Image (cartoon, rainbow, N blue to C red):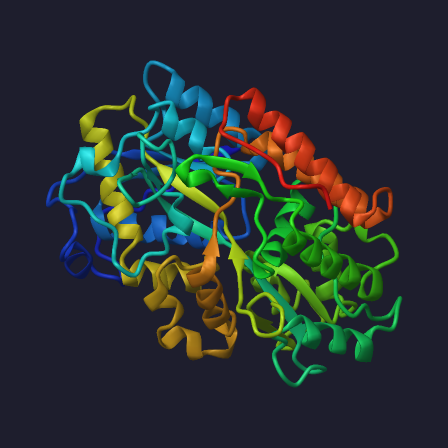
Amino acid sequence: MGLLSSISKAGWTGAIGIATLMAGTTLSANAAEPITILVNSSPWYAGFEAVVDQYEKDTGNTVEIDRTPYGGLLEKARNAVRGQESPYDLVNLDNGWVVEFYSGGFLSPFNDIDPDFKLPDEAITAGGSIYWNEDKQWPTPDGGKLMAFSPNANAHLWYYRSDLIDTPPATYDDVLANCAALNNPPDMYGAVLRGERGNPIRFAFTPHMLAYGGSILKDPENGDFTVTFNSPEVLEALNMFLKINNDCSVDNPGSVGQSEMIQLTVTGKAAQAGIVVAAQAQMDDPQKSIVVDKIGYAPMPYPAGGKPAGVFGSWQMAIPENISDERKQSALEFVDYFMTADAQQLYAEAGGIPVRFDTLRGPLSQDAKYRWMEPYATVAENATQVLLYKEGAQVEEVLGLRLNQALIGELTPEEALNTAAEEIHAILEKSGRKTGMLQPL
């Protein structure tokens, strides 16, 4: 599991400056209760740790971090919030888990701790996943309570070889034209996407589906769980997804995961790729990459006449209900600090992905090192969440299987979408949702 390590270096005011950071926040003049944070091992962890370190220097408060591999994180979080008293004051949750924790009453709404607390207007809210409307049983700021903040709002960017491609690709026509010009396997693949069965292909396909105006369900936020996954729009998106894979990618695109896609890119074998923003630091790392300063970034491609779309694979950090009021207040003080503009700049400089738009579009974004910031800000403005309902994990299993079968040729695109729609409908019907189906393709 993870290594629990106190990284306290309290007692003096660091570079950010406590006077500046206290302005307009809930930070108290007295030392807060020590806090312990459960967080995942991740590419952005170094940035998070740097902010924690600076927080201790600036405030004199003490923080312990339980850095845990992804596979063990959910179990630790569940055990913590369901026990008599949580050992953690902040728990980091994958977006696929939040409905369980929100609906179960295991977390403390921020404004129950401090009625005056608010996130900065510039904060990325990760498609509303940090809120919970109890009446609707839906994550939304519309009538919902603030339950968490997002320390990482991961989304896809379109990575491309800027030394080989003069203009940032925008539409699918651009992507295919670049592929036609540069595809020369096995030395160079024109474009690479994640096709591995399960979450990888579901997550990779979703921005393409959204760009074509497709959806999985009709209007789940308002209770209409009619299955729309076998619509003409989703079929058009799937055909484009398959064309890119078949015409531009490796011989076995159905086995490509994130690590393989990143490896192809940093070794100079991929001219274009749809990769999450968190991987950008590896592109300019001379210890890992032979394409340093040769990767450009753009929003995900879209049909001619359309606009960029994206989907969040975000993290939500929340405060357990089963801790004392003093511990809750101390945890909220850290949240306040983390979301300040100065802390977010430090976060970026140390390898994190900022979750404030003014940081993403501030002076730092003009530095070539941070050339990914403006494209990511554009994506984050347009990105949304999917599968944030109690049946989401089951639905993802269906999508991850049937999309992969279409990619490897076991099913036609129409068969894959129709089969998935039937299976999703059965799941929703069994759980008592108001649901229905489209006519088969």
Question: Which residue reaches farthest top?
Answer: 84
Q: Is residue 229 above or below residue 287?
A: above
- Residue 261 found in image quarter: bottom right
Question: Residue 247 appears at what percent x and percent y?
Answer: 83, 65
In this picture, residue 44 sits left or right of residue 325: right
Q: Report whether residue 426 is seen.
A: yes
In the picture shown, does residue 197 fall above or below 177? above
Q: At 60% from the left edge and 51% from the top edge, which residue is drawn?
A: 206
Above/below status of 357 relative to 120: below
Q: Quadrant of residue 355?
A: bottom left
Q: Residue furthest front?
A: 439
Q: Is residue 255 visible?
A: no
What residue is drawn where x is 21% and y is 56%? 13
283 or 434: which is nearer to us? 434
Residue 112 location in percent, x, y?
19, 33
Q: Nearer the viewer, residue 432 or 410?
A: 432
* Residue lying at 50% horizontally and 27% vertically, measured from the top left: 433
Residue 152 % position (x, y): 45, 51
* Relative to 46, 294 lies left or right: right
| x and y, in percent, of residue 49 in the image | 42, 49
In this view of the protein, which residue sits in the foreground, 175 or 429? 429
